[in-house]
Amino acid sequence: MTIVTVGIDLAKNVFAVHGVDATGKPVLLKPSVPRAKLAALIASLPPCLIGMEACSGAHHWARLFATFGHTVRLMAPKFVAPYRLSGKRGKNDAADASAICEAVTRANMRFVPIKTLDQQGQLMVHRARQGFVEQRTATINRIRGLLSEFGVVLPLKAAVVRQQALQHLEDLPGWANTVVGDLLSEVSHFDERIAQYDHHIATLAKADPAARQLMQLPGVGPTTATALVSTIGHGHDFSNGRQLSAWLGLVPGQYSSGGKQRLGHITKAETPTCALCWCWAQGRYWLQQKTRLTRSAAGQPAWPSGGVTGAPLWRLRPKTLACAGQYCTGEMRSNFPCDSDLRKRSFVSTTA
């Protein structure tokens, strides 16, 4: 019988392949396929539907298998788990491949858009920049911790840590002076790398027509635009805006039962980077417009001297509004610090 559906359990070196015919009968059982032989095996099959979990390397394999004429679908692992039949056969690679083969044929299954090489390259820029920001934050916190052993207690703000640590540098004895000096040098190095990647993101945004179109929306800059484009792509995988919002995680978690609705926090479940960027960008714009109206109604200038860009949003302190800063990451807080983050105790970051 002709193979119509194939499920592949991805791994680093050894893969499991499960293929079925039109009646659902298993006709291809390969519980242990070496990495070097997987492409040749799939290329030898007639065009069919291939299902895989969206994990490391999944987009690479999806693009490769598509060149062989197959239809490839990626699924979130949590959507495959109910089909694993763990009560009957247990958890192993062969059972996972069988579950993937079963799940990919379901009419109500949600699939992950397959990313292009350009999209993954842009996402790598964002991930690298985020990693540099996290390392810079860790280094600054390390400086604060080491200086506290010598009675020098510094506040959380990164700029103050840099300034005061440099002022106390000459007062530190011997090796302590060397260590703190090296750490301050590392912070400066991270600043240069982050600025370099900011330039990379700005260049990507200018070269991408879709990103330029997104930047016409209020509150959306190069970082948000390129993150959305590289993650969502053309957006044709979604029927409407509600589906996109749910996929991004911009919906509350629901724990309803017995006819009683229980809505939780915004999940930011599937794509936290895009969800947080979008929340932060739109929240900043909403706060700016609300503050503009409030100041205008009071007979005050819409913005302090320097215009919008010269007046950081956090200095306006609209106390009656919920701040989108509770959803932002350390990367965004490094550009747009917000007082309410510390008041809400949602997290502490020295990048602000």
Image: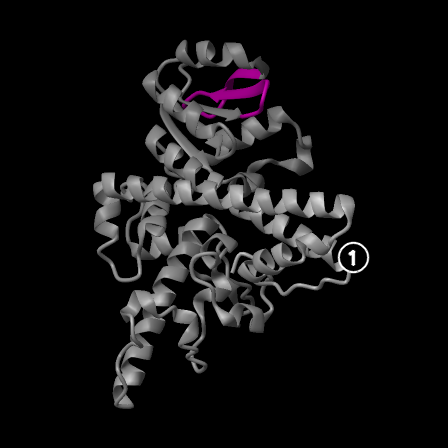
Q: At x 34% / y 18%, what residue is drawn?
A: 47
- Can residue 349 be seen here? no
Count of number-bearing discs: 1
Residue 63 vertical position relative to residue 243 in the rendered view, above or below? above
Q: Is residue 24 magenta?
A: yes
Residue 142 vertical position relative to residue 76 in the rendered view, above or below? below
Q: Are there few (<14), some (14-19), or many (20+) residues within 10 Å of tag 1?
A: few
Picture quarter with the N terminus = top left
Secondary structure found at label 1: loop
Q: Is residue 307 magenta?
A: no
- Please, which colouring scheme is shown? one colour
Q: At x 68% / y 48%, what residue is drawn?
A: 180
**Residue furthest toward the bottom?**
298
Q: At x 38% / y 66%, what residue is drawn?
A: 283
In the rendered image, residue 271, in percent from the top left (x then y), is placed at 45, 48
Residue 28 vertical position relative to residue 223 in the rendered view, above or below? above
In the rendered image, residue 316, in percent from the top left (x then y), is placed at 40, 77
270 and 281: which is toward the camera? 281
What's the amino acid at mark 1? Glu
Residue 326 vertical position relative to residue 11 in the rendered view, above or below? below
- Can residue 284 be seen here? yes
Q: At x 45% / y 71%, what residue is drawn?
A: 323
137 and 130: which is toward the camera? 137
Q: What residue sits right under mark 1 in the picture? A: 149
In the rendered image, residue 9, in percent from the top left (x then y), is placed at 55, 26
145 and 273: which is toward the camera? 145
In the rendered image, residue 199, in percent from the top left (x then y), is placed at 35, 42
Q: Which residues are magenta?
A: 10-30
